[in-house]
Image (cartoon, rainbow, N blue to C red):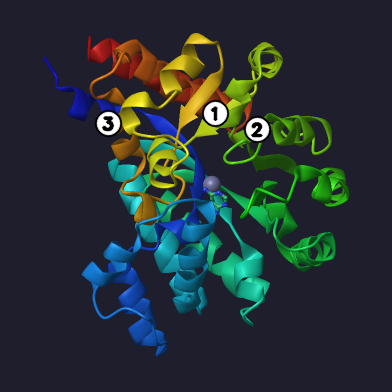
Amino acid sequence: MLDLDAFITGLPKAELHLHIEGSLEPEQMFEFARRNQVAIPYASVEEVRAAYDFSNLQDFLDIYYAGADVLRTEEDFRDLALAYFDRAAADGVLHAEIFFDPQTHTHRGIPFGVVANGLLAGMAAAEAKHGLTSKLILCFLRHLDEEDAFKTLSQAQPWIDRIDAVGLDSSELGHPPSKFERVFAAAAAMGLKRVAHAGEEGPPEYVYEALELLHVDRLDHGNRSLEDPALIARLARSGMTLTVCPLSNVKLCNVASIDVHPIDRMLRLGLRATVNSDDPAYFGGYVGDNFRAIAQGRTLDRDDLVTLARNSFLGSFLPDNAVATHLARLDAYVEAHT
Ligand code: ADE
Ligand code: ZN
C-alpha cells in the first residue's frame, strides 16, 4: 500500500493562501542581502530560524516586514516567486493564488511595478517550467489607512488586468474589515474578486463584516467563526471557502497544538475548508507539510484529505472548465491509489 506521505505529495491540489513574502527562506534572505548589499540583523541562518518563535500575529509581522527589506529588484521578486513555485510543484500543487503586500515595498521606495513585474515573471516561468498556473491577489495592509489602500489600488492600474483579486491582511485586532468597505467596493467595480483575512485572531463580528461589507468571495482563516453557530450554518449553507492554515495557527498560538487543530471539525460541520501554508518559510512548512501535520494522529482519513484537495479547486478563482479538468485529474489519482 502506498504510504500516506507519498499519497499526500502526489495528491493534486491548489494553494489559495500563500503570502509570497512569507516564502522568503533564511538562506534566500542572506543571498538577497548580499547581492543588494543590505545589512540584516542576523549573523547566520540558524540565528534567523531561532528568531522565528512567535507568541502572536504581531510578533511575527514585525519580523516578516523587516525580512522583506532585502527584496529590492524585479529579479528578487521573480526569484522569490519561482523558488516558491518549485516547492509547490514538488508538493503536487497544480494551481496557486498568491498574495502580495505592495505597501510593504512601496513604503520603502520600491515602485509597485518592480514588485508586480517581478512576480508576474516568476509566475510565467513557473507555468513554463512546471505547468503550474497561478493568480495574483493584491493585499491591503489593514494597519494602514483607507487613503493608503486607495493610493495602492490606483498604483496597480497598469497591471489591473493581471491581478485577479484584492485581499486584506496584517494586524487584525483593532482593524476591522469595515475600515476598507469603500476600497473593496472600488475594487469590485473594477471587476476584481475579494478575499479577506478574518477570524484569525479577530472575533466572529469581523467575519460578518467581511461577508456583509466587503462581500468576500473567499474567507482567509475564518477559524473564530467556530465560536458562532449561526455563522457556521451560514458559511456552510453558502459554500464559502475557508483558506485554513494549520501550521500557521499553531506557530502564532491561535491553536494550542496541531493535534487539536479544528480542521476535522470544520469538515464535519460542512464547511468548505482548504489546507494552505500562509507563510511557509516562517511557520515550518509548505502545503504538503501542512497536510502531513493534520493527517498524523487524528481522525482525518484519506477521504477527508481528498475532500480538502477537492475544496481547493472548488474554492479557486479558476474558470469552471479548468476546475472540472483538475477535479477529473484528482479523481483519476484517487482511483489509481485505492
Ligand atoms: N501577513 C502575512 N501573513 C499573515 C497572516 N497570517 N495574517 C495576517 N497578515 C499576514
Ligand atoms: Zn495569511
Q: Which sits earlier in the primary sequence, circle 1 or circle 2?
A: 2
Q: Which sits earlier in the primary sequence, circle 2 or circle 3?
A: 2
**Residue 132 placement (x, y as % from top left):** 42, 44
* Numbered tag placed on residue 2 in the rendering: none
**Residue 104 placement (x, y as % from top left):** 61, 69
Q: Name the amino acid, label 2.
A: Arg
Q: Which residue is drawn at 23% across and 76% down?
A: 44
For disc 3, the neighbor class at 10 Å (few under 14, some 14 to 19, many from 20) is: some
Query: From the viewer's perspective, is the residue at label 1 or at label 2 nearer?
Result: 2
What is the secondary structure assignment of the residue under circle 1? helix
Q: Is residue 191 visible?
A: no
Image-based side of 246 in relation to 108, left or right: left
Task: Tell me where residue 202 sits by quadrant.
Answer: top right
- The residue wearing badge 3 is 292
Q: Residue at x 26, y 81 (%)?
A: 43
- The residue wearing badge 1 is 322
Image-based side of 143 in relation to 227, left or right: right
Q: In this view, does 229 lie above or below 326?
A: above
Choose between 229 and 210: the one closer to the eye. Answer: 229
**Residue 100 placement (x, y as % from top left):** 58, 58
Q: Name the amino acid, label 3.
A: Arg
What is the secondary structure assignment of the residue under circle 3? helix
